[in-house]
Amino acid sequence: MRLMELKQKHLLGIEHLSADEIEYILQTAESLEEISKRDIKKVPTLRGKTIVTLFLEPSTRTKTSFELAAKRLSADTLSISKDASSFKKGESLKDAAKTLQAYRVDAIILRHSASGAAEFLSKQTDASVINAGDGCHEHPTQALLDAYTIKKKFGKINGLKIAIVGDILHSRVARSNIFCLTKMGAELSVVAPPTLLPVDVEKLPVKVAFGIEEVLEESDVIYLLRLQAERASENHFPSIREYRRLFGLDADKVKKLKPEAIVMHPGPINRGVEISSTVADLARSYIEEQVTSGLAVRMAVLYLLVGGSS
Ligand code: NCD
């Protein structure tokens, strides 16, 4: 059973995926992870396919992870970024889509500062569109790689207590993770100052806490978010010091965690703000594992959406 057979051509978000579809992507990732452990880290699965990364917002790990995933599956890759393309001259997404359409590319992986950009692009092209982060909306492969990391560590997601801490309001990672982890049966808490919570937070299937101390002892996973200076247009809390005191994780607070509990962060981290340098480097900090999972999950998504008929 391929995702295309499940009537998915694009991956625009987690919101409209079922728990079975998520599980299926995670299982596919599990079977592809082994390729990256081989001496020759490449299979011919997507040979002859062309995959474009169109990143109109800065990114290190998501872009490199997708590019590496495509290369490990033998696809041809094209990389377009804002500063080195006609986007700098004001080219629209619609016109870029037309150009790429003329080359008959098979998939476009889009990062854009506007919520809804991936859905817009999907209507302008015959290629599969994969959302690699659109404004404050969704970042589906981040949530999938997080779910994969958690499942690998605990053997399950169902019933785990997971707390997402930080700027829930501006975070596409938080939104996708809330959809993904609740569909997979986790008990979710969001921890943030009231000013960094969405107005309709009570409609979400999550508990709300206003300080990290409230969730330390009970959580299996503490998921820290980066404070998003580029999206916060006004001051949402008194000071960085205050934020660190109430929502940051440091060596003292980490002692209150259960022995098996892990710390996660999508990166890039602000050392000394949401996570202290000591905590970032602890064995229970799974940031590097998340990057490793990212490669396997993105290989799975490309495989399921772009082809792999053999
Ligand atoms: C996230 C993003 O860009 O949404 N980073 C990422 O993809 N690894 C989170 C963030 O920027 O804070």
Image (cartoon, rainbow, N blue to C red):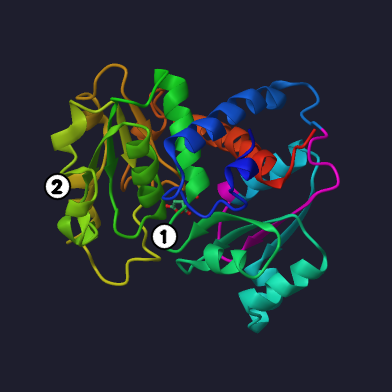
Residue at the image position 63 percent from the left and 79 percent from the top: 92
Judge the density around disc 2: few (<14), some (14-19), many (≥20) Cα neighbours within 10 Å.
some
**Quarter of the picture holding the C terminus:** top right
Give the numbered dot on residue 210.
2
**Depth order, front residue of 102/223:** 102
- Quarter the N terminus occupies: top right
Find residue 169 and report its horizontal and vertical position in percent. 29, 59
When the figure is inspected, residue 278 is found, relative to residue 178, above or below; the finding is: above
* Rendered image quadrant of residue 293: top right
Up-down: is 3 above or below 98?
above
N-term mark: 2 or 1: 1
Three-letter residue code for mark 2: Phe
On residue 137, the disc is 1
| 132, above or below 257, in the image | below
63 and 256: which is toward the camera: 63
- Distance of label 2 from label 1 (alpha carbons): 23 Å
Q: Residue at x 63, y 41 (%)?
A: 5
Label 1: few (<14), some or many (≥20) within 10 Å? many
Which residue is located at x 62 percent, y 74 percent? 93
Identify the magenta region. Answer: 44-62
Of labels 2 and 1, the one closer to you? 1
Q: Residue furthest bottom?
A: 90
